[in-house]
Image (cartoon, grey):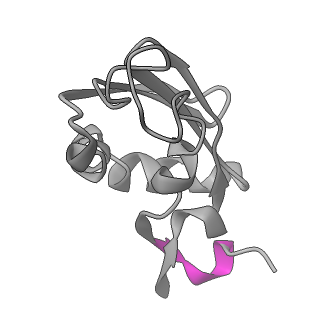
Amino acid sequence: MDRIDVPLHAVAHSRAGDKGNRSNLSLIPYDPALYPILAEQVTEERVLALFAHRGATRCTRYDLPRLAAFNFVVDDVLEGGVNGSLNLDGHGKTQSFRLLSLTVSVPRELLQG
């Protein structure tokens, strides 16, 4: 099977929410056939490493196979949260863009467009 490395945003979308100093990131592949491939590659460890520079201490991934989606909860990533931080993204809404910057290897035939 011919594979190609692509940024995650080429094969999935994400939304972010927050509560206190915790960010909640959804990850949903455009094609449900990509769900098991992303499950192998977008791990808790990889996501935690992606946000380590922000002080993240833990990442928990919740698999939602019936929805072909994932939910990542990243602790201590918002530099204190909306009320306790001077960062420009106090709500952490742009964290989904950072998640989508990860590179994944996918079968070429599953790429859209």
Residue 84 at x, y percent in the picture:
38, 16
Q: Is residue 1 visible?
A: no
The residue shown at (53%, 57%) is 100
Residue 75 at x, y percent in the picture:
30, 22
Task: Write down the quadrant of residue 23 in the picture.
Answer: top left
Q: Can residue 16 be seen in this view?
A: yes
Q: Which residue lies furthest to the front in this view?
A: 86
Q: Is residue 107 magenta?
A: yes
Task: Write down the quadrant of residue 48 in the picture.
Answer: top left
Residue 29 at x, y percent in the picture:
65, 51
Residue 70 at x, y percent in the picture:
52, 33
The residue shown at (42%, 20%) is 81
Q: Residue furthest right?
A: 113
Q: Is residue 104 magenta?
A: no
Q: Is residue 110 left or right of residue 52?
A: right
Q: Is residue 93 left or right of residue 38?
A: right
Range of the magenta residues? 105-110
The residue shown at (43%, 38%) is 87
Q: Height in image: 78 above or below 48?
A: above
Q: Height in image: 58 above or below 55?
A: above
